[in-house]
Image: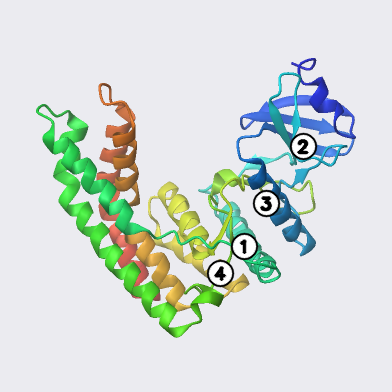
């Protein structure tokens, strides 16, 4: 492997003392720190946008990130002898954030709030036109769920997953339709009150991580910071409350939908980056949507039909089992914050 990658290693001004595998990539210990070498799996223009975005974050003080490193030819990726492109990113040693350890959870949400403050500043300093993504397309998701229902209904013989999906459809589809109506009304009202061109209807408009959860956090002291943020593959410009919702949803799943955990996350975020009732209402609407039911429908319709993974049924059963806890959590959130 070392011989195969020699052209890649030699393209960077560093001495490698150790190579390890981790997170689907190579972790390199060098005389200049820890780095991650990974296959390029995005368009080069997207990689260039990532470099500029992360450079903006670092210039404004948010530096514990897996920033891209240029090679000695000032290029963002390097090809091996077979033409396969690789990207080198700064990295750090440590452990993954533990979503059931409240100390880790608090560090993670404070890190998110700081990232959002800087991410908004970077956006405001950006010259020229930018693409702003609106993520709450519940109409499209609801159409997907309905399409799956129609497909299963036409099948003569139905397996256990398909039968349970049909039995659950009315309950979860009604949730989806209600969220669609509330979200569309919320965005319309917000755009009437604010300059839609400037804020796109959202108070917290700025850079979003796109997949912020415990998997994207490394608990480390390598850079003098307790948290390293990685995996910005899906970063975008949009409503930063999407990140907070995603972090809440993933963390609460690991904590049996404990409302105290939700309160801690919201309150700690608010201390660093204040949020208002409209933000909380947005998060509430996002959380009300049957996200897992939609994802299972999407996995099913895009997967192999002659063999269904047992995981699909396991996930559906778990989702149905946890639904009561989720609804109680939402009711507590509504009473406390809305």
Q: Position of residue 205 (x, y in %)?
A: 56, 69
Label 3, label 2: how many angstroms apart (C-alpha)? 20 Å
Quick one: SS at disc 2?
strand
Residue 110 badge = 1
Quadrant, the N terminus:
top right
Label 4, label 1: how many angstroms apart (C-alpha)? 18 Å
Q: Which residue is mark 3?
A: 49
| For discs 1 and 3, the disc positioned in front in the rendered view | 3
Q: Which residue is mark 2?
A: 35
Between residue 34 and residue 139, name the one nearer to us. 139
**Residue 196 against residue 80 in the figure, above or below:** below
Between residue 194 and residue 27, name the one nearer to us. 194
Quick one: SS at disc 4?
strand
Q: Residue at 41%, 82% (x, y): give it.
A: 192
Q: Which residue is mark 4?
A: 205
Q: Is residue 112 left or right of residue 228?
A: left
Q: Residue at 65%, 61% (x, y): give it.
A: 115
Label 4, label 2: how many angstroms apart (C-alpha)? 31 Å
First in sequence: mark 4 or mark 1?
1
* Residue extending furthest toward the front: 128
Q: Residues within 10 Å of mark 2 (few under 14, many from 20)?
A: many
Label 1, label 3: how many angstroms apart (C-alpha)? 25 Å
First in sequence: mark 1 or mark 2?
2
* Residue extending furthest toward the bottom: 193
Quadrant for residue 335, please give it. bottom left
First in sequence: mark 4 or mark 2?
2
Quick one: SS at disc 1?
helix
First in sequence: mark 3 or mark 2?
2
């Amino acid at each position: 492997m070392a011989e195969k990658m020699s052209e890649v290693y030699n393209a960077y001004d560093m001495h490698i003392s150790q190579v390890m595998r981790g997170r689907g990539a190579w972790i390199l210990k060098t005389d200049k720190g820890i780095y991650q070498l990974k296959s390029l799996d995005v368009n080069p223009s997207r990689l260039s946008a990532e470099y500029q975005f992360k450079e903006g974050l670092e210039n404004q003080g948010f530096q514990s990130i897996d920033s891209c490193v240029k090679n000695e030819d000032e290029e963002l990726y390097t090809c091996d002898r077979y033409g396969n492109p690789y990207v080198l990113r700064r990295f750090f040693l440590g452990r993954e954030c533990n979503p059931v350890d409240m100390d880790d959870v608090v560090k993670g949400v404070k890190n998110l709030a700081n990232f959002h403050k800087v991410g908004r500043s970077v956006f405001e300093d950006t010259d020229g036109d930018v693409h702003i993504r609106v993520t709450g397309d519940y109409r499209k998701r609801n159409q997907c769920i309905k399409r799956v229902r129609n497909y299963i209904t036409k099948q003569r013989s139905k397996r256990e997953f398909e039968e349970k999906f049909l039995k659950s459809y009315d309950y979860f589809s009604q949730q989806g339709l209600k969220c669609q109506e509330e979200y569309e009304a919320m965005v319309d009202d917000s755009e009437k009150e604010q300059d839609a061109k400037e804020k796109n209807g959202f108070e917290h408009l700025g850079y979003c991580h796109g997949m912020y959860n415990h998997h994207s956090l490394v608990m480390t002291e390598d850079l003098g910071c307790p948290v390293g943020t990685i995996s910005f593959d899906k970063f975008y410009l949009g409503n930063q409350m999407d990140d907070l919702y995603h972090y809440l949803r993933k963390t609460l799943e690991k904590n049996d939908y404990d409302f105290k955990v939700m309160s801690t996350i919201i309150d700690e975020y608010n201390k660093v980056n204040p949020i208002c009732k409209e933000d909380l209402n947005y998060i509430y609407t996002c959380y009300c949507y049957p996200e897992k039911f939609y994802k299972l429908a999407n996995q099913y319709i895009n997967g192999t039909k002659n063999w269904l993974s047992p995981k699909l049924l396991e996930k559906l059963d778990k989702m149905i089992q946890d639904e009561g806890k989720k609804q109680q959590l939402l009711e507590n959130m509504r009473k406390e914050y809305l």
